[in-house]
Image (tube, helix red, strand yellow):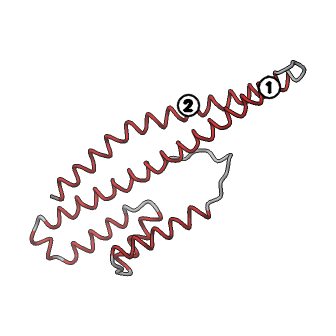
Amino acid sequence: MLNLSVAQIELSINEGDHSVNTLIDSFTYMSQHLEAIEQSSQKIADMTDQVDGMAEHNASLLTQTSDLSEKMHQAIIAFQFYDKLSQRLNHVSVGLSGLAEIVSHEMHAKDQAQWEAFKLNVRKGTSMQEEEELFELIFDQERPVDEAIEVMKGRMRERLKSQPVEDDDPFELF
């Protein structure tokens, strides 16, 4: 059952990665071109203030490209969350594989050193702050899973509220 879970997670990650990577590339490409259109529109607006109606047309064009650019930025940020999800699922898959290896051998399952080595290996595989904190809550503080999840949900909500929004911040995929 553990091996089946690992295989399903791995296949899901691989399936989603290709599609999401294509979407990320497309949105990044469109976002870059939208910025160029905004710059060109601004130049046209600056050059044609004397022509009747041109300023209004350019203002409308600038507003539309700006709105579209904002929506694309939001979409790219949403893709970043998928990337984090993919990493987490990959870490879960590695953990389940290690667990399957231990429990499939009776001698390993009874060996405390095997379990400690397994926990250490899982901990080394954490690459995100939330993963490390969750590990600490469950293994170091020995909190129940439901309680640890609630604690992490609260922390993550607080972090989202306190994150500064920077317009010039380049997109970073994890």
x, y percent for residue 7? 22, 49
Q: Quadrant of the N terminus?
A: bottom left
Please indicate whether residue 88 sits to the left or right of residue 45 in the image: left
x, y percent for residue 91? 34, 57
Q: Nearer the viewer, residue 67 or 79?
A: 67
Please indicate whether residue 132 sits to the left or right of residue 106 in the image: right
Contact, CB < 8 Å: mark 1 with mark 2?
A: no
Q: Secondary structure at mark 2?
A: helix
The numbered dot on residue 114 is: none
- Residue type marked 2: Tyr
Identify which residue is drawn at 40% across, 62% down: 126
Identify which residue is drawn at 60% across, 34% down: 31
In which image quadrant can residue 60 be found? top right
Q: Secondary structure at mark 1?
A: helix
x, y percent for residue 15? 31, 40
Identify which residue is drawn at 21% across, 78% down: 112
Please indicate whether residue 24 sits to the left or right of residue 52 in the image: left
Q: How many marks?
A: 2
Q: Is residue 115 above or below residue 42?
A: below
The nearer-to-camera label among 1 and 2 is 1
The numbered dot on residue 29 is: 2
Q: Which residue is mark 1?
A: 43
